[in-house]
């Protein structure tokens, strides 16, 4: 009984009694826990990387189709021609030097521009001409891979002609020049000997045909 009274007196004084567990007060010196990290909102499925429109992950986005009508290789873009021909008309022959440039290819025709310098003479008359042509060639008449190609093309041409005539019996020379436009048709073939040079044989008809510049020509072309 004395022991029970002593235990009651100790408990009332705030001293823990033996064998009784007491709650531990919180430590005021411990750091406060860190706040939970905030997560960014999840974007919609159709805007996430790696997903295409329509929500199909892994699908490749549709790319724009690029089309071009330029199909010639670098050797086919331009070339030089050195040739000789037989003229129909007053003169006996003609020599020529030309430069040809590929412009483009459409659904029906290939377009090219050609500049040609020609010279000819007979007795007391000498003539030189500079012609610039815009030529159209049907794309179905040849293939770039062919070594022997038919040649059919037509187009307008602008000519500047210069003539020098020595008057017989007189020690004088008369000069004359003229510029005119004609339409030409070429028919023949071209043969590729190597990738850099070949041979072209063609005949030319013109309208109107009152000028003696129509000829059959054989030329070596360099590319």
Image (cartoon, rainbow, N blue to C red):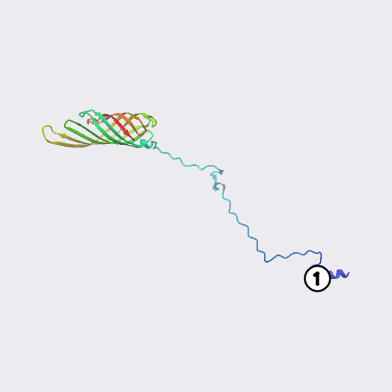
Q: 2 or 84, which is in the foreground?
A: 84
Q: 201 or 203, which is in the foreground?
A: 201
Q: Hey, which quadrant is residue 11 in on the image?
A: bottom right
- Farthest residue in the right direction? 1
Position in image of residue 86 (x %, y %): 24, 28
* Quadrant location, the C terminus: top left
Identified at 85% across, 70% down, the residue is: 6
Q: Hey, which quadrant is residue 36 in on the image?
A: bottom right
Identified at 83% across, 69% down, the residue is: 8
Position in image of residue 214 (x %, y %): 25, 30
Position in image of residue 59 (x %, y %): 54, 42
Residue with the mark numbered 1: 12
Left or right: where does residue 223 sit relative to residue 23? left
Left or right: where does residue 110 sit relative to residue 62? left
What SS does tag 1 mark?
Answer: helix
* Quadrant location, the N terminus: bottom right
């Amino acid at each position: 009984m004395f022991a029970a009274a002593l235990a009651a007196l100790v408990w009332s004084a705030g001293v823990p009694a033996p064998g009784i567990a007491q709650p531990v007060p919180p430590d005021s010196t411990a750091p406060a826990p860190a706040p939970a990290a905030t997560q960014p909102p999840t974007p919609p499925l159709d805007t996430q990387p790696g997903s295409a429109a329509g929500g199909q992950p892994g699908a490749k986005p549709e790319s724009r189709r690029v089309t071009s009508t330029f199909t010639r290789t670098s050797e086919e873009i331009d070339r030089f021609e050195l040739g000789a021909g037989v003229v129909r008309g007053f003169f006996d022959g003609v020599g020529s030097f030309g430069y040809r440039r590929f412009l483009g290819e459409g659904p029906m025709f290939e377009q090219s521009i050609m500049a040609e310098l020609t010279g000819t003479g007979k007795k007391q008359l000498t003539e030189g001409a500079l012609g610039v042509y815009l030529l159209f060639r049907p794309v179905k008449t040849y293939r770039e891979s062919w070594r022997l190609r038919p040649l059919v093309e037509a187009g307008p041409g602008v000519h500047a002609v210069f003539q020098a005539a020595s008057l017989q019996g007189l020690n004088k020379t008369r000069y004359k020049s003229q510029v005119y436009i004609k339409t030409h048709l070429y028919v023949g073939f071209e043969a590729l000997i190597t990738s850099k040079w070949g041979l072209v044989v063609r005949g030319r008809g013109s309208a109107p045909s009152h000028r003696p510049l129509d000829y059959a020509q054989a030329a070596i072309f360099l590319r």
